[in-house]
Each structure stands twice: as C-alpha cells, then as structure tokens.
C-alpha cells in the first residue's frame, strides 16, 4: 500500500454524493459530520438489525442526529433525495442494501447539487454506483497507543487520484489528521533523522 502525505478528496466535496464501505465506515460518517460541524440525517431500512449506540459516537453529539427508518430501499432513496434537495441538514447518510442504478445515483447527485447538501452512501464492500463522486474503504488499525487509528483508502475518485492514508481523529482540533506509517513516526527505530 502506497501512502501519500496529504489527504486528498477530503473533506468531502460539498453538494455531491460519496460512498464509504468497510468495517470503519460508521466512524468515517461520524468524523465527517463532526469535521463539517453538520447536523446529520441518517436513512436506513427498518429491517436492518444493527443499531447505532450513541455512547460509541465519541465526541459527536447524538442530538444532532435524526434517524429515519424506511420500509424498502426505494423509500430510502426517496427520503434521501428529498433531504438532499431541501438542504436543511449538512449531511445526509443513506444505507444502501442493493445496487443502485445509474439513474438512481444521478438523481441523488442532482438533488445534492440543488440543495448544496453533501450525501454519503454506506455500501456493502464490492458494491457501488458509477455516479458516486468518491468511494472510500475504511478499516480500523490496531495501535496500542491510539485507539482511533484507521486506514482510509480512496478507491474511486471522479476528480483526482487514489491513495491510502493512516488517519486518526484529533478531538482538540475536531478534524481528521494524517498519521505517518509506524516506521516513520517520531521516536520509532526506523524513523529518518
């Protein structure tokens, strides 16, 4: 994996719809909402068994989250499209359980552009829409010194290059910070200098 020093394509391009997958995708969503200082509308189908635990949100205030549960993905798409177009919240998250058609993906992009709202689709790995602006794969990284360390890989980018970054949440600055690989961190045996 090649690591690049600067995190490109993040923060997410506003007024566009992006995708995220992987075991740390929910962390990506919450960190993005915090960094944007945005209220969050989360749309998902009611049959999904997983529950969000506000105690696991870190420093994100759960009072800024509105959860909408729908009967089917067509309802999820309709609610998300209206919310994106309305522009009342800064970030609209929708959980996708089946592949999106190009038409559905484009409708979401047009709604995001009209409302100036950022959209983020949580997708299963290996699934995605051709209409997405960017697609991220996020996974936790074990580090005994930093429980927030994650590996973010940009695997689709309509307006730039791909890359991989070790990142952590900087609670004091309220932003995502890029971290050097272990052998290059200050104090490590392999660090230059």
Image: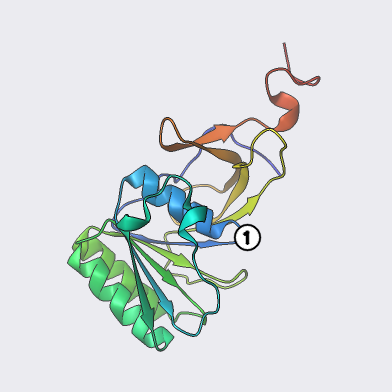
Q: Residue furthest top?
A: 193
Residue 162: percent from left, percent from top:
56, 49
User: Residue 5 vs residue 76: left or right?
Assistant: right
User: Residue 103 vs residue 166: left or right?
Assistant: left
User: Residue drawn at (40%, 44%), measured in percent from left and top?
Assistant: 11
Residue 73: percent from left, percent from top:
42, 84
User: Residue drawn at (79%, 21%), measured in percent from left and top?
Assistant: 190
Q: Nearer the viewer, residue 23 or 65?
A: 65
Note whether 143 is above or below 41 in the view shown.
above
Identify the image's colour scheme: rainbow, by chain, secondary structure or one colour.
Answer: rainbow
The residue under label 1 is 23
Q: Nearer the viewer, residue 11 or 93?
A: 93
Q: Which element type, helix, strand or loop, lies under badge 1? A: loop
User: Residue drawn at (18%, 67%), measured in percent from left and top?
Assistant: 86
Q: Residue furthest front?
A: 55
Note whether 146 is above or below 19 in the view shown.
above
Residue 96: percent from left, percent from top:
48, 76
The quadrant of the image that shows the C terminus is: top right
Note whether 115 is above or below 46 in the view shown.
above
Note whether 185 is above or below 11 in the view shown.
above
Instruction: Please tell me how crowded label 1 is: few (under 14), some (14-19), or many (20+) other residues with Cα within 10 Å.
Output: some
């Amino acid at each position: 994996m090649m690591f690049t020093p600067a995190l490109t394509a993040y923060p997410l391009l506003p007024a566009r719809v992006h995708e995220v997958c992987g075991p740390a995708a929910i962390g990506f969503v919450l960190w993005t909402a915090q960094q944007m200082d945005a209220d969050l509308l989360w749309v998902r189908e009611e049959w999904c068994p997983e529950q969000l635990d506000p105690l696991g949100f870190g420093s994100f205030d759960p009072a800024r989250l509105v959860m909408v549960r729908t009967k089917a993905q067509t309802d999820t798409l309709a609610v998300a499209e209206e919310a994106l177009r309305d522009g009342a919240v800064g970030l609209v998250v929708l959980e996708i359980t089946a592949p999106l058609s190009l038409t559905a993906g484009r409708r979401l992009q047009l709604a995001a552009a009209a409302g100036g709202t950022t959209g983020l689709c949580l997708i299963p790995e290996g699934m995605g829409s051709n209409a997405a602006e960017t697609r991220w794969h996020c996974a936790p990284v074990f580090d005994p010194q930093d429980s927030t360390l994650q590996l973010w890989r940009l695997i689709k980018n309509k307006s730039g290059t791909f890359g991989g970054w070790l990142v952590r949440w900087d609670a004091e600055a309220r932003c995502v910070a890029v971290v050097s690989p272990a052998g290059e961190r200050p104090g490590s045996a392999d660090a230059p200098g």
